[in-house]
Amino acid sequence: MKIKDGKLLQLDAGDSWKLSTEHMSSEHKTSGPFQSGLPDTIVIHYTAGTTVDGAVGTLTNPSVKASAHIVVGYQFASNSETMEKDRVIEQLVPFDLIAWHAGKSSYGERSGLNKYSIGIEIVNPGFLKLMEDGKTYQTEYGQKVPQEHVAKLKHRNESFDRYWQTYTDEQLKIVEEICLALKAHFPIKYILGHEEIAPTRKLDPGPAYPLELLRSRVLDLRSNDDHHHHYGTGVVSVNNLNIRSEGSMVAPKVARPLAKDAVVEIVEEKDGWYRVKTEIEGWVSANYIK
């Protein structure tokens, strides 16, 4: 991916994602151009819904005082329990204009993060409700979520566990690609969650999103050769080995579990954990790699 004239370009015509600028406008829901040297921050959000159309409808509604630069789809359709997918990236605001995604916010000595940042919205409902039958999970608006896409996690701003819908591997990969394109075009120094810049009122993108892993992969100042130093290959020795955002049993899972006998490239070792590279990078317990 590449950015030109404030727009995200999709260079690979064979890519399975559709990039749309159908709803993009530079005439409303912005505060004008960024100042020189900005933006230098990316803020990650979830939409709190289940479809691209729903998010775009809200963010382009003139009566709603909110906007974002990008909406990343590929999530369960709200009218189906069969996991229909929506591989659409909608750009709503040019990257060289300020969007209204952060609201009242601060980070470090700066406040009002809209004027410093690009806002990326990812289609995901966030936290879920476990129904009385003890096995059905629903969004706030009543859509059912398959159990295999639910994780019980503690949010950084809360002291208790909730059920959260996990992000798809494809969403994680496409958001990383967008962030890398933004970093190549703008002086990006920070990638933050909405929950970090408005901790008393926001929970997105939530503990199911591997923010630390994204920051490491996009902002890591080491060279690619150092970052992907080859420690060797390993083979998964157990069924369904969880791959996590950090080397910790409580860190969020970042992909579906690795199958037994899967071959992985080991790129880092730390405190009994390996950071491994498959389709995505993450951490696994070294006890289960041979």
Image (tube, grey):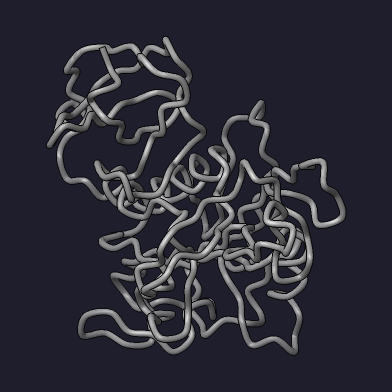
Residue 184, percent from left and from top: 35, 48
**Quarter that holds the C terminus:** top left
Please report the residue visible at 44 percent of the width from the left and 58 percent of the height from the top. Answer: 153
Q: Quadrant of residue 29?
A: bottom right
Q: Nearer the viewer, residue 32 or 168?
A: 168
Q: Quadrant of residue 43?
A: bottom left
Looking at the picture, does residue 137 appear above or below residue 114?
above
Q: Nearer the viewer, residue 192 or 133?
A: 133
Please report the residue visible at 30 percent of the width from the left and 59 percent of the height from the top. Answer: 188
Residue 23, percent from left and from top: 74, 65
Residue 5, percent from left and from top: 52, 57
Q: Quadrant of residue 39?
A: bottom left
Q: Nearer the viewer, residue 38 or 102?
A: 102
Please report the residue visible at 55 percent of the width from the left and 58 percent of the height from the top. Answer: 164
Q: How many marks?
A: 0
Give the farthest residue toward the front. Answer: 133
Looking at the picture, does residue 228 appear above or below residue 191?
above
